[in-house]
Image: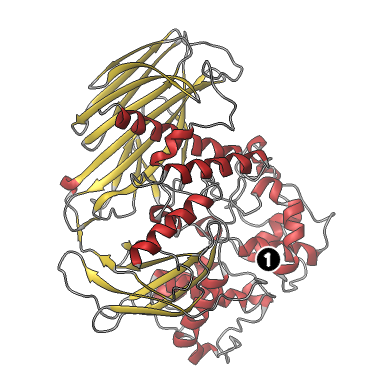
Amino acid sequence: MQSDSKSHTKRIVAGVCAALLLAGALSTGVRAASSGQAGSLTPPVPTEGRESYLQNCAPCHGETGQGDGPSAQGLGSAPTAFAESTAVSDLSPADWFDATKNGRMDRMMPPWGKRLTDQQIWDTVGYAWTLHTTQAQVGMGKAVYETNCASCHGPDGKGKSPMPDFTDFSTTAKVSQSQWAQAVQAGKDGMPALGDKLSEAERSAALEYVRSLSMGPLFSSAPLVGNGVISGTVTNGTTGAPVADLSVEIAVFDGTSVLDQRTAKTDSTGLYRFEGLPTDPNLVFATRAEYPKGVTNSAEVASFQAGQSGINLPLPVYETTTDPSGVRADRVHYIVEFQNGQAEVAELLVFSLDGNRAYAGDGAGVLRFNLPPGAQGLSISDGELGGRYLAVENGFVDTLPLPPGQATRQVLYRYTLPYSGGKLDLQRSLAYPATNVNALIADQGEKVTTEGGLDNQGIRQTQSGNYFNLSGQNLPANQPILIRLSGLSSATAAETAPGAAPAGRILLYALAVVAVAGAILLALWPVLRRRARTVAVADEAADREGLVDALAALDIAHTNGQLSETAYRDQRLRLKAQLLDLMRKEQGQ
């Protein structure tokens, strides 16, 4: 029955993958000090601020707070991404109010003080605040608060002198989440440090709940309930032993949102159990656990079938290693297109790790990515520099530990390369051994030569246009690769490959190897709050017919304006990479 649930889940995710899309690079948000007073400190009612946010803020900040509104690309600096907790943690609600009322014209943020009342601004700010959290996280935080905080701060948060009153908005509005987090982590003014007692997820959830105590209703929907049960055993995949007394989280997805999130502890046999879950077959469930500290491990995702009330989801966890010898790039894709007289380059790398330990890196990072000389405008599809990804000399690193197994990590990033005289040398090197390396280069009539292990397979005619196809196998780590282009057009207008189809008709058969199952949701969970962004990896078992249907849904979403150009472009790049895999498979290479 478990395999049926997984198969059913693949069909569900395939049907909704048009809604699970990349949001592109997000801004780091406003970091300057407030420039005015916070007006009357009236508690906001977030549920009342939704319409104001959609009308006044979404054009730049995006409907779901991803910083990807239709007007965002025309600004001199990227709008704050309210959906990213790291982008807003250093700002207090009062900071948000001041920036909204008084404006930040240095960042093209207009003042709204003459258009909206203070209460309208507060309600709008309150709604924007909810975009980085969920009802499930706040509910989880309430349970953590009641267990660890209520004895001193009171069950209602009012506390007794000298404890602060968390229900007093005039006090809490001036404090940021990061300030509270520091106090919880290290202790302050007689408060004990809870850094070793609570996980990062528990601390964050508790502080979101504390914030809610001084605001009006954050969410309007009721929690999900039912008679479903999901259970499983957490086993140390390195030692083979069950893991007792470990916190396990479960999330409920509807394909576009995290609807609910709960926690449970494993018993002495390593068994976890979640009861009272909804059994709607259209919902998807994913479990994860942090072991050891800072390393997230996830089970396969599943859905209830009609009439089913129980699912078993084993959850493996792993010890860590600092030995990178088992890391390899199973697939490396370069996609090069041309627009406005410059090359637009996308790189997609799919990683695997041999052995039975998670690779935790060398202290400076886990996976390293080199950028070519002259690269500009780096955009990472599932993060930004300063968060999970850190800038280093000549590139950047991913700090997220890599779990063992096949195709356990995928990273997609984009950048531009200017060229002159109709010539461009794309110099690449791979920090890890690469099993298959492929490149698609839009055919603009240029000449293409290559050095370093890639062979020119000639022109490929696709439904998305004509492309030079370069490929190589079993390249060693740090192998220099040179792709030399000459005879390029210097036109400044947007250029498309000869024979290219309209943007809505994208590489139908490439979807035969696009991910449609667990990897999507498990990669999304850390960043998916009230809306979704995708980080997909290849799944050879994907159903061709179902994926073609998913592509049709993708096209419809884009045509109807439900998908930003940035998200649509990133998805296009992924599909082109998958097309290379499919062509190789069909030709028996």
The amino acid type found where label 1 is placed reads: Gly
For the point 71% across and 51% down, the residue is 57
Residue 358 on image: x %, y %: 23, 57
Outermost residue to the front:
307
User: Image point 76% across, 66% down: which residue?
Assistant: 39
Q: Name the residue under label 1.
A: 126
Assign the C terminus to one quadrant of the image. Answer: top left
Q: In this view, does 110 lie above or below 46?
A: above
Quarter assignment of residue 455: top left
Give the number of marks. Answer: 1
| Quadrant of the rendered image containing residue 175 | bottom right
Of 403 and 15, which appears nearest the observer?
15
Residue 306, position as x, y percentages in the image: 48, 69
Question: Which coloring applies here?
Answer: secondary structure
Residue at 65%, 77% in the rendered image: 214
Q: In this view, does 323 lie above or below 117?
A: above
Q: Is mark 1 on a helix, strand or loop?
A: helix
Between 571 and 31, the residue placed more toward the observer is 571
Front residue of 348 and 466: 466
Residue 299 can be seen, yes or no: no
Residue shown at 35%/46% (left/top)?
539
Image: 133 above or below 159: above
Quadrant where the N terminus is found in the figure: bottom left
Q: Where is residue 301 in the image (x, y as percent from the top left)?
A: 39, 62
Q: Can residue 327 be seen in this view?
A: yes
Badge 1: residue crowd in 10 Å (few <14, some 14–19, many ≥20): many
Image quadrant assignment for residue 385: top left
Residue 192 location (% of width, % of height): 40, 83
